[in-house]
Image (spheres, grey):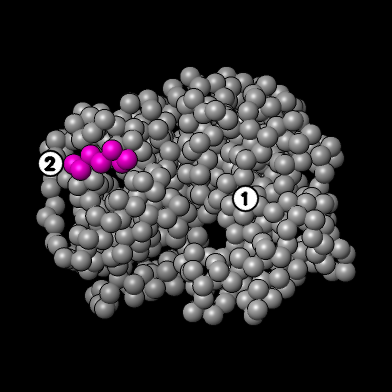
Amino acid sequence: MIKEFENAAACWREILSDVSKDTGLLSVIEKFARESAAPAKIVFGTSGWRGEIGTDYTFNNVRIVTSAIIEMFRGSDPSVMNAMGAAGFEDIKKRGIIVGHDNRFLGRDFAMEVIGLLQKEGIKTWYAGEAITPEFSAGIEMLNAACSINLTPSHNPANYGGFKFNPSDGGPAGAEITARIEDIANRMMTVRPVLQPVQPAEIEKVDLTQLYINYITGRGTVDLKRVRDFVDNEDCVICIDNVHGATRGRIRKIIGESPKIKYLRTEDDYLFGGVAPEPSDSNMKGLKEILKGSNARFRLGVIMDPDGDRIRHADEKRIIPMNYFGAMALHFLHVHKGFRGVAAKSVGTSNLVNAVAEKLGIPVRETSVGFKNFRPYMISGAREKAIVCFEESDGISGYNHTLEKDALFGVLLAVEMMAVTGKNLSDYLKDIMDEFGYYYPDRSGIDVDRSLAGEPLLKKLSVIRNKCKAGTAVNIDGDLKTVKEVITVDGTKLVFDDGSWLMIRPSGTEPKVRFYIEARTEEGKKAVFAAAERMTREALFE
């Protein structure tokens, strides 16, 4: 007999407490998801709306969000249509919408709800099935679609569902679009409507992986032939950890079948083996064992999140986070492939890329957190075209490539790096650091009183930028460092004369202050963290 639960949240707690024995309780989650009419607060963060399946991410609430999007289309507001890249509702209906999902629980069922509602309004739809975020981005451009709806919460735990919306340029939707969806959806929520499901009239399937292959072949940022030749002809092993996500099968289809490529965690598992399905160092144990056990000359390992927009690299010597790989990508694309433009990075990212860029004469553009902030440097016809754009949270794209972060691009670029340089990634990174300097990034933070969350915290911390202007001396464990530059695009970032830096960034929703730092030695990180915390506490108690 299946145990009864008061709500989906209680059921999820039991499931996640022991995923080896409680898979059967997913039927209870499905019942909550289908029957609940409880409203939810719809917020599109840096990459879509996310919620717990059966609690706030329910079939009815997915219908409401879809209906809000349709109402937004019908309104044909000029600012929205401009951001959409569409002429109006009739244009959207004709060009169509790609709908798909990652391989989480109930993904196809949620997608059918979306497709049914869109088709009822006369909107052309394509069903992508199980697909990943960069494939949607490439597919939009290849089909000249109006937009895509990708039902994924990215790297969130197994109890989450998500809803990503991308306009016609393939990038993450900007605030002009998401704010309108939020407004309409939350207004609908206040009257607590129960919307009836609509069955799709027909399902037109689309192969987004093949469209992605056509896209990257045409763009030429990555040399697919060189990648395939390297795998075929060199003494190499490539280990790809899919963490039970929708990235499974993609690299096999792009590169081809090869015994030199090992795939981990490709099986269906709605609970991801009980781990957070993210490209973290702690999730790379199996991958590292394979690399260390191999005698191949070239060894590469990657781990990708379920919707394929985050990646972390490794070889047998070390893990290479995006803070370093992004700088390597800039160096490779500029020096070895001849691309010209700017380096775009989120403000909390390592300054190794700054050092590389400065010596090579490449301008650097630092943005707020969120990949959508790279759009001005990635769109077709951009005045300043990004050679690479990346953020420390494992997202990357490159010259003339998708406006979405792309883990597949990260895999292919890493293989091409080895093919061209004749070096494993850690050796290539060492060469770069020997030439441009050594940098050691990290992050931490502190909790603050709940009453400070939001605007009060922003106001208190703003005094730091007023006190620490360029030329100010800051005590870092007895060593006076001079502030060379103050960057305020997202919090306050103080860059010191030796290239080390600290950034103090208040959370916009939680009572927390986040610290991003970088020292010039591994041992120096502790002192920079201490200085960031000291400055924060002084600002809070002034």
Q: Which residue is mark 1?
A: 347
- Tag 1's secondary structure? loop
Query: Residue 341 colored magenta?
Result: no
Q: Nearer the viewer, residue 31 or 97?
A: 97
Residue at 64%, 24% in the rendered image: 339
Residue at 74%, 44% in the rendered image: 352
Report how far apart the C-alphas of labels 2 and 1 lie in the structure.
44 Å
- Where is residue 536? Give x, y as percent: 66, 71
- Are dots 2 and 1 in contact, CB under 8 Å? no
Which quadrant holds residue 421? top right
Q: Is residue 286 above or below residue 430?
A: below
Tell me if mark 1 has few (under 14), some (14-19) or many (20+) residues whose alpha carbon lies within 10 angstroms of its own: many
Residue at 66%, 38% in the rendered image: 364
Q: Quadrant of the C terminus?
A: bottom right
- Where is residue 218? Give x, y as percent: 48, 19
Question: The residue under label 1 is which amino acid type?
Answer: Val
Residue 524 visible, this orientation: no
Q: Nearer the viewer, residue 259 or 314?
A: 314
Residue 120, labelled with which disc?
2
- Where is residue 272? Give x, y as percent: 45, 57
Q: Which of labels 2 and 1 is toward the front?
A: 1
Which residue range is magenta in the image?
A: 74-80
- Tag 2's secondary structure? helix
Compare marks 2 and 1 and give the one earlier in the sequence. Answer: 2
Residue at 62%, 73% in the rendered image: 446
Q: Is residue 442 above or below residue 257?
A: below
